[in-house]
Image (cartoon, coloured by chain):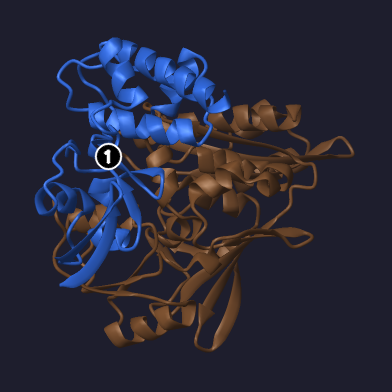
């Protein structure tokens, strides 16, 4: 067992984990943060996307020990004091989901793209940038709309 | 899927990593970003008894202008290659190819050193570095040795790094204004290349001096020597491209038959040469 300390959604969490423990299972089963989903479990679908030090990663392909000392952000870390994050709000307003299983990963991937300054002005840009996340319900239409909406809002409020 | 149990230590330096490799024995593996190794371990296709985590060696994550070449630290992640101003200026084919790997999440974790050490003939950067005649700096307790790309890729998942050595740096010659292209054919955005073709082209006295590399056309990344020779002896692009599959051994799998890959390699070679000549 290895002792690790990961700052998850702003709170330092110390745990004993087996080196082989995947980060996604550590988050879901050890820390009870089940917002992050396991989809394909082969680094393809993006359902398990979380941020490590602000950058999106697929947590089914990261060991919990690799996150030792890092800051991890999950979907549970976005809403502040009961107010939804602009991305969450945009997914709600634009009906950016059907079954919802891919949604936490979509939102975390989108947050990383917005923070990195990735061009997200037109639909084509967004579709290309979302190459790491799969949705089997929506045909992506409303996901793209939601991200365009949120990116526009977040960037205009950041530059205001 | 959770991998089989293994021992795990974090390396504090390159020399510490070598010391840990020595202690764990020859089946231990270095873990960088883990985006080649961990999927194999989850599928039980690799069962290393111990991992030495070099992922925290931030002093091996750099992109430096060394005059004629760009020196890239082995632990530089694909995203850093993709957005590097130095590479975009001097080796744009490398930043372009890095941006073609996987997806943003993968590019945040995967490293250039991990990708080439893995020895996968489907790795985009491997064929690009072979095309550019890059050099690989291999570190061991007895010092550093420098291996040219032509000697580095030995066989399927086998490169010229012993179990008691580690790759620390890749030296990439500057393009010096040469035209370039990397044509990657894949069905879905995040997929591996069914076939990829890298080209770097200079015109000299009417003939074309080209280096052409192939992804997923054999057990290692390959150079399309027959295409290069045809061009240097005056063949036009369309004719030379027909030689792309000469001396290759493409895989026959769910992504495409060997025959399909042979045809694809010719088409992509033509496109890569045409794009290179237009730059």
Asked whether, in this view, residue B192 is left or right of residue B224, the answer is left
Q: Residue at x 44, y 28 (%)?
A: A129
Q: Can you give x and y, in whole percent of width and height, for residue B265 in the image?
A: 51, 34
Residue furthest out toward the right: B205
Q: Can you give x and y, in whole percent of width and height, for residue B176 in the image?
A: 79, 47
The chain coloured brown in the image: B
Q: Is residue B249 visible?
A: no
Q: Quadrant of residue A26?
A: bottom left
Answer above or below: position of A144 versus B150: above
Q: Nearer the viewer, residue A84 or B75?
A: A84
Q: In which quadrant is the C terminus of chain A drawn?
A: top right
Asked whether, in this view, residue A89 is left or right of residue B263, the answer is left
Residue furthest out toward the front: A81
Q: Can you give x and y, in whole percent of width and height, for residue B3 in the image?
A: 16, 59
Q: Is residue A113 visible?
A: yes
Residue at mark 1: A77
The chain coloured blue in the image: A
Answer above or below: position of B22 versus B66: below
Q: Residue at x 74, y 30 (%)?
A: B277
Q: Residue at x 74, y 26 (%)?
A: B278
10 Å neighbourhood of mark 1: few (<14), some, or many (≥20)?
Answer: some
Q: Can you give x and y, in whole percent of width and height, for residue B272 in the image?
A: 62, 32
């Amino acid at each position: 067992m290895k002792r690790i300390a990961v700052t998850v959604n702003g709170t330092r969490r110390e745990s004993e984990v087996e080196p082989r423990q995947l980060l996604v299972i550590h988050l879901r089963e050890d820390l009870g943060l089940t917002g992050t989903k396991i989809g394909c479990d082969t680094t393809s679908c993006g359902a398990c996307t979380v941020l490590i030090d602000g950058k999106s990663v697929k947590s089914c392909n990261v060991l919990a020990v690799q996150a030792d000392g890092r800051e991890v952000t999950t979907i549970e870390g976005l809403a502040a004091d009961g107010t939804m994050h602009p991305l969450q709000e945009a997914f709600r307003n634009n009906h950016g989901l059907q079954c919802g299983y891919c949604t936490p990963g979509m939102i975390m991937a989108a947050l990383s793209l917005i923070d990195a300054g990735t061009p997200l002005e037109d639909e084509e840009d967004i579709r290309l940038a979302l190459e790491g996340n799969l949705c089997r319900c929506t045909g992506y239409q409303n996901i793209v709309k939601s991200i365009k909406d949120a990116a526009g809002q977040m960037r205009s409020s950041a530059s205001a | 899927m959770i991998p089989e149990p293994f021992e795990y230590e974090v390396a504090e330096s390159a020399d510490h990593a070598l010391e840990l490799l020595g202690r764990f024995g020859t089946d231990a593996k270095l873990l960088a970003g883990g985006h080649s190794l961990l999927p194999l371990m989850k599928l039980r296709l690799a069962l290393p008894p111990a991992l030495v985590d070099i992922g925290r060696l931030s002093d091996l994550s750099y992109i430096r202008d060394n005059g004629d070449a760009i020196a890239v630290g082995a632990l530089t992640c694909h995203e850093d290659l993709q957005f590097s101003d130095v590479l975009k200026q001097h080796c744009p084919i490398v930043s372009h190819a890095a941006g073609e790997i996987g997806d943003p999440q993968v590019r945040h974790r995967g490293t250039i050193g991990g990708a080439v050490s893995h020895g996968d003939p489907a790795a985009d950067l491997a064929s690009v570095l072979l095309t550019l005649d890059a050099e690989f700096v291999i570190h061991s307790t007895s010092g550093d040795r420098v291996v040219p790309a032509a000697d580095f890729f030995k066989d399927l998942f086998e490169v010229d790094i012993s179990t008691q050595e580690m790759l620390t740096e890749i030296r990439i010659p500057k393009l010096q204004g040469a035209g370039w292209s990397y044509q990657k054919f894949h069905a879905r955005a995040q997929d591996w290349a069914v076939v990829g073709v890298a080209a770097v082209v200079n015109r000299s006295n009417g003939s074309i001096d080209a280096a052409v590399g192939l992804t997923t056309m054999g057990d290692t990344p390959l150079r399309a020597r027959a295409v290069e020779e045809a061009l240097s002896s005056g063949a036009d692009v369309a004719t030379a491209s027909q030689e792309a599959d000469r001396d290759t051994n493409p895989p026959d799998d769910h992504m495409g038959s060997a025959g399909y890959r042979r045809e694809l390699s010719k088409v992509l070679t033509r496109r890569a040469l045409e794009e290179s000549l237009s730059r």
